[in-house]
Image: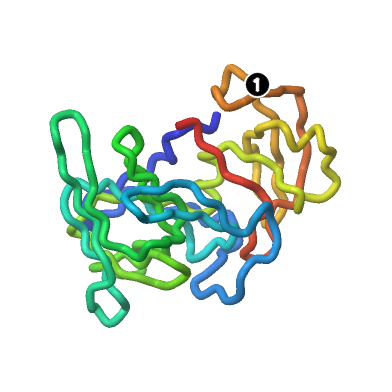
Amino acid sequence: MASCNHGSQTVAGSKVVNEHSQNIKELGPALKGECSVGDPPQLNIAEYKGITFFTENTMRGRGVVHLSINQKVDILNLDKTLYGSIAPKIDGEFTDYEINLPKTVIARQIIPYSELRIFEFDSESPQQDNTYLTVYINKERKLILKKDVPYRFLSWNDYIKSAFVRLTTAVQNISIAERKYMYQVVEIKDDAMSIRSVPKSACDYVEDYKPISKWIKWRTDHCKLIEFNFCY
């Protein structure tokens, strides 16, 4: 069953515990062009201290990296100059963040609120560099020192299976009623995906349920046609 916990590949510092899955056609390492499909191509997911955070339908790199930010993390350009930073400020049970980034940020998921603290980025495989993580922010590659932050990397296949999904209008051969439901991903074969609707007991966000199992086309090249949902 999909859940809020994105899999089991926990990494501390620079040590990769498990090799990421290779059972999906890789989408990187360098993807060009932007998605013109989906509902819409970019989605506003959070606003925090004057910064607006978006996710997008374009999938970059080899998967997604989740950062556990417990100390200041510098984000570098490819030439190692400073691009920005994220620094926590812990006040009792609450964690506040000082985020030095552009006023508009596109990344997989950044939700800095103290009850969530989600920092997820499209990423190349951590195994490609012993020192740095290569992540994508505002559609560009950036670097983060591995030693500065515990992280967890999931291949695209594993990340998608850790989520529930909704179907956008870009998914073909789907009725209006079927777009109301939330689904669990059962199997992925290249750009095809087997899904199964989930009942209300699986997630508080599920409003309607009807038992449905079917195959869909979930992506076109590097553009996803589905929406990721997590029961935060």
What residue sits right under mark 1 in the picture? 199
- Residue name at image x 48 percent, y 47 percent: 45
> Image check: 138 left or right of 152?
right
Residue positioned 40% across, 72% down in the render: 141
Image spot of residue 97 (x, y percent)? 23, 48
Q: Quadrant of the C terminus?
A: top left
In the image, residue 50 sits, relative to residue 184, either above or below, namely: below
Q: Is residue 61 left or right of residue 134?
A: right
Q: Is residue 14 above or below residue 168?
A: below
Residue at coordinates 24% horizontally, 78% vertically from top-left?
A: 80
Considering depth in this image, is 91 or 22 the residue closer to the camera? 91
Task: Decide if residue 101 is on the left or right side of residue 165.
Answer: left
Tag 1's secondary structure? loop
Residue 70 in the image, given as x and y percentages of width and height: 19, 46
Callout 1, which amino acid?
Pro
Quarter of the image with the N terminus is: top right
Give the residue at x 32% y 32%. Answer: 115
Q: Is residue 126 above or below residue 212?
A: below
Where is residue 52 shown, x and y percent of the image?
42, 54
Q: Quadrant of residue 165?
A: top right
Mark 1, other Cα within 10 Å: few <14 / some 14–19 / many ≥20: some
Q: How many marks?
A: 1
